[in-house]
Image (cartoon, rainbow, N blue to C red):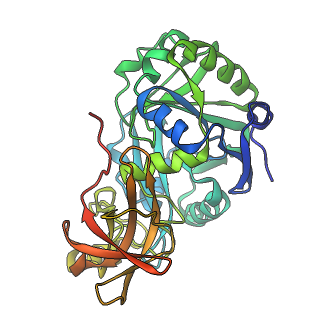
Amino acid sequence: MKNTALTQTHIALGAKMVPFAGYNMPVSYEGVNIEHETVRKGVGVFDVSHMGEFLIEGPNALKLIQKVSSNDASKLALGKAQYSCLPNETGGIVDDLIVYRVKDKTYLLVVNASNIDKDWQHIANYNKEIGAEMRNISDGFSLLAIQGPKAVEAMQSLTSVDLSAIKFYHFEVADFAGIEHVIISATGYTGSGGIEIYCKNSEVQQVWDKVFEAGKEFGIKPIGLAARDTLRLEMGYCLYGNDIDDSTSPIEAGLGWITKFTKDFVNSDALAKEKEAGPQRKLIAFELDERGIPRNGYDIVDDAGEKIGIVTSGTMSPSLNKGIGLGYVPTDISTVGNSINIQIRKKAVPATIVKLPFYTTK
């Protein structure tokens, strides 16, 4: 297993460590509910340095990104980022990612840790004809997500940039915690606001220490991957490997909004036809009507007990204190308000299809 530059720090803090995407990662410190509430109400820090980073540079950089990604990167101004995905040749998704326009002809792609090698190979295959400059910088960089409604206020003393002025899906390259030229972005996956810091591995311990020093009066805490999962699920954000994968199309996954047919990209013709005809199935959100915890892989059944779909993500929502989840069902069943059942062990627990997000800030 790989370690992040902060692995020993997590162990010293008493984190429960687990293998995740080939890395030794902290899954929790005090417990998922405490950590979840910390991010929803205060400020918490995630070490997500296992994520992958690719630099795409040169005069053909945009051409390559436009070919391999679903969103329209030509709309990116300097200092702006966008959520996107890498469609495959058979209608599925290689990965979801964030694209940052760092310089005029330089883009940073941030990909999922479990897909770094697969994504690199996929993009490199299309680059053979395009000839952009590609650099995989994943092993040299760390990423901290400082999340929560108090995060911006708590971190303001560490930088000369006005953090409150960085809008969602924007970023600055600036000084932070005594380090120059770090990326400070507002692209978090929790729904509670905050910032993310990209820096070199050699700098991240200094950043971590100063972040916790600055956040002490705000009750700052380290947060593990378990709470990251419950937080993103309450927002209805997809998790690669659960809700989207090589066999799910962006259209059926509800990602049509990042799939722009004003340009030509991998498998765009087939995806355009799928959008026009309507997908056979759709990713839906549901809440249980009774007590229970839905889990990935549980069957979705009709009133007669016949399987009609499958749960892709599920948990007991710490914020709502009820079972919530995502899953695929036939399109004709996918209307908000419809009743379905989740097969939890031997019981079919009734549930209602709802509109996302599950959780909204007051």
Evaluate whether residue 57 shows in this view.
no
Lateral position of residue 23 relative to residue 224, left or right: right
- The residue positioned 59% from the left and 21% from the top of the image is 181
Lateral position of residue 122 relative to residue 60, left or right: right
Q: As displayed, is residue 196 above or below residue 51?
A: above
Quadrant the C terminus occupies: top left
Q: As displayed, is residue 121 above or below residue 27?
A: below
- The residue positioned 43% from the left and 64% from the top of the image is 292
Residue 197 point in image, percent of width and height: 56, 29
- The residue positioned 63% from the left and 64% from the top of the image is 118
Please tell me in which quadrant of the rendered image residue 40 appears. Answer: top left
Q: How many marks?
A: 0
Task: Return the residue nearer the eye: 28 or 126.
Answer: 28
Lateral position of residue 321 relative to residue 5, left or right: left
Q: As displayed, is residue 43 above or below residue 74?
A: above
Evaluate whether residue 219 shows in this view.
yes
Residue 55 point in image, percent of width and height: 59, 44
Please tell me in which quadrant of the rendered image residue 53 appears. Answer: top right
- The residue positioned 63% from the left and 37% from the top of the image is 30
Residue 276 point in image, percent of width and height: 21, 76
Residue 268 point in image, percent of width and height: 35, 70
